[in-house]
Amino acid sequence: MTAAPARHPHSANTRAALLDAAAREIRRRGYQPASVSRILAETGVTKGALYHHFASKLDLGYAVFDERFVPEMRTLWIEPLQACDGDPVQLLIDIIRDAGAQMTDADVALGCPINNLAQEMSPVDAGFRERIALALEAWRAAIEEALDRGLSHGLLQVSVDTRAAATFIVASLEGCIGMAKNAQSAEILRQCGDGLVAYLRTLQNRT
Amino acid sequence: MTAAPARHPHSANTRAALLDAAAREIRRRGYQPASVSRILAETGVTKGALYHHFASKLDLGYAVFDERFVPEMRTLWIEPLQACDGDPVQLLIDIIRDAGAQMTDADVALGCPINNLAQEMSPVDAGFRERIALALEAWRAAIEEALDRGLSHGLLQVSVDTRAAATFIVASLEGCIGMAKNAQSAEILRQCGDGLVAYLRTLQNRT
DNA sequence: TCCCATCCATACTGGTCGGTATGTTTGCGC
DNA sequence: GCGCAAACATACCGACCAGTATGGATGGGA
């Protein structure tokens, strides 16, 4: 479903514009309150074009998740983690600090799109739920593997259960982002992040 | 807005039934997708009765939050914390373990109603956002005060920043509940909870 | 007993929703 | 240049939504 034969070259642009606008709309309002009409109005694309590229609103929602939200998370978290051969805890701290420093209150107010969809859609739609579960599991696994490498390099406390720690890190990260989202405050995000950093440091082997 | 003059005694029952049904509906679907018609169908109450008791759907939503969700959180968390004069960390661990043990997968799949509304409504409606901020702050403050008492009794590491710790505890708790909600698994909730418990233990003064 | 506010019931409205049927344009392959 | 499918456009549909107008039932206070 990613790409059509593309006989007409501009077609891909239309599709991309729809995905971008839908991503903004879903980020801001969530999937269910997202309005197809608003997406069309914002892009200037007509309804016929949209339903040529996507079978339904749900299909569009899935595409936004797969082609926008997941890649974003991959480049921010998974790829750095996989490339990490130093101290994974320090890498996590750096990402948290960097991302926290760059975000404005407006960014923070939108939260994490994956977690937004998890909270909204998991009781309602199995397709979203399974996609989200896969994405979160990939994230968790990347953290666990990085922790494992750090452990084998003697950088972590030997008592650390890397699987449990990775699970908790993902959960508390989403929790911090969620708290800051409601507060609409990058300052709160940093405060919450500091709490998480304090936890992360307890995993390090301090010698 | 809590209670009308109640000239007719049955009136309070109607109102309570509406609040209960609306609470179920909002728990399951969120506020925006919650349908007034479904609430009426479930209760057997008519639309005239509903709009006699509540000025609007939003008013009903606020009442559900104030009179159902917040009291629930208060009895589960705030009151035990305020009554705690022993080790606050152990109290938190006990609550987490007890609540986790009692919950079924179906319960877990609904998540925390306060956090659900935070993620859904904070970018959309200031009234919800402020209510949620107050509730979360009350929760955080109750934890902080309990930690402060524990600290003064020598039960915690003297290096603990109780305010930051309380903030992080709330955030990570909501994060754990959110992860388990998407997984629809009480087992995941317990695993995440174990991670949080491991963090909580790092706050204790082990001597 | 009768008044009157409270409480509830019914029918309806305007608006938005996602989706579709049908027609037109576009541009590559031949 | 022609054929033809991909790509887009327009108009419309039924369903559902929150909310309202209006009238009727109810029951306690004077």
Image: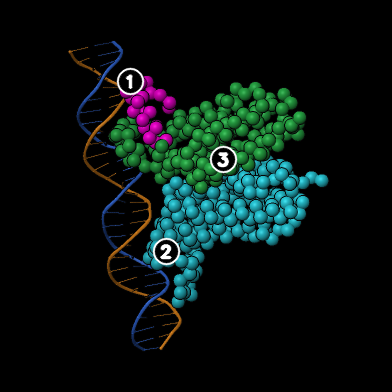
Chain colours: A cyan, B green, C orange, D blue
Distance from Cα at disc 2 to Cα at disc 3: 39 Å
Q: Quadrant of residue D11?
A: bottom left
In magenta segment, residue B12: yes
Label 3 belongs to which residue?
B190
Q: Main secondary structure of the magenta part?
A: helix
Label 2 belongs to which residue?
A54
The mark nearer the N terminus, 1 or 3, is 1
Q: Residue at x 59, y 31 (%)?
A: B94
Magenta segment: B1-23
The location of residue B194, given as percent across then percent down, is 61, 40
SS of the residue at dot 2? loop
| Residue B204 shown left or right of residue A45 in the figure | right
> The disc labelled 3 sits on which kind of residue?
Arg
Q: Is residue B74 visible?
A: yes
Q: Tally the numbered discs.
A: 3
The location of residue A160, given as percent across then percent down, is 70, 45
**Chain of the residue under the numbered disc 3 shown in the image:** B
> The disc labelled 2 sits on which kind of residue?
Phe
The location of residue D19, given as percent across then percent down, is 35, 39
Tell me if label 2 and label 3 are in contact, CB under 8 Å: no
> The disc labelled 1 sits on which kind of residue?
Pro
Label 1 belongs to which residue?
B9
SS of the residue at dot 3? helix
Q: Mark 1 packing: few (<14 Cα in 10 Å), some, or many (20+)?
A: few
SS of the residue at dot 1? loop
Q: Nearer the viewer, residue A163 or D12?
A: A163
Q: Residue at x 67, y 46 (%)?
A: A161
The location of residue A141, given as percent across then percent down, is 61, 54
